[in-house]
Structure formats: structure tokens, C-alpha cells
Image (tube, rainbow, N blue to C red):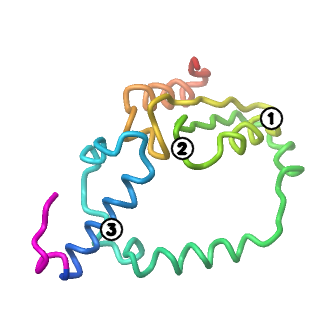
Amino acid sequence: MQHRIEEITTSATYRKMVDRLRLAAMMANPKTIDRIQGDHSNLENESPESIDFVMSKMYESIGDWDWRDDMSNLLMPVLTIQGEQDAVPMDSAKERVEILPNARLLKIPDSGHLPFVEQPDIFYPAVEKFLNGKWPEG
């Protein structure tokens, strides 16, 4: 995606570039970004100007809450899916699965934070199997 300097200075083009860079940083294989359809950069809450503000407010609102004790009371089946190359530490997914009494972890290879984009042939059949009352292999 090459742009002339005049194009980069326009807000819409800048926002598209930032959106693509942000999404690519979440992926194990940034080339798979072309699978994402639609233009999320035109959504006001996804603008580069909004992301930092929204994220800082979200983290402030979390406070010092620790839900782990309460989570152990949840009995419904929970499928946690995480890409093996996700920047979010795998240990956090493992901890959730250990705390929840009826949970499983599905690690998706060659995937970052967006396994439904990078590995749809693994992700969607696993979700379908789970929603049909069975645990996916893995």
C-alpha cells in the first residue's frame, strides 16, 4: 500500500494506514490482514485519536478488581481460544481455564490476536463444534 505524501496528510488515508498497522501488529502473519473486509478506520471510536483515550479510560475503570474467586463458581462450558503468537500472554488464558471448572483452551497455531482472520479453517469449525455441545480437539 503505497501513498503519495499528499494522500498521507489527509485524515481518511492516515486513519486507514494507522488501522492497518495496528491490526497487522496483532497478527502472526501480517499478510493475512488483506482478509479483513470493510474499513474500520472510518468508525469514530476506532480513530487513532480515540484509541488511546478509550483504552486509558478502560484500564482506569478496571481498578484493582480480581474476579478469579468469583469465576470458579461459573459452571457453564467455556471455550477460550487464543492464537499461539498472540501478544496477550498465554499464561493468562491458561489461568482462566484452570480457574473455570468447565473450561478448555484451544491454542491456534500460526495466529496472533485475530485467529478468526488468520486461521478461519481452524477457528470457525471449533466454535461451531463448541456451540453444538462438543469440545473441539486441540
Q: Quadrant of the C terminus?
A: top right
| Mark identifier at residue 24 | none
Measured along the vertical axis of the image, is residue 44 above or below residue 89? Answer: below
For marks 3 and 2, the one nearer the N-term is 3
Amino acid type for the residue under numbered disc 2: Asp
Helix, strand or loop under label 3: helix
Mark 1, residue position: 98
Measured along the vertical axis of the image, is residue 7 above or below residue 119? Answer: below
Please provide the residue range marked out in magenta: 1-8
Snapshot quadrant of residue 4: bottom left
Snapshot quadrant of residue 105: top right
Snapshot quadrant of residue 102: top right
Measured along the vertical axis of the image, is residue 72 above or below residue 130? Answer: below
**Badge 2: how crowded within 10 Å, few (<14), some, or many (20+)?**
many
Mark 2, residue position: 86
Label 1, label 3: how far apart the Cα atoms are: 37 Å
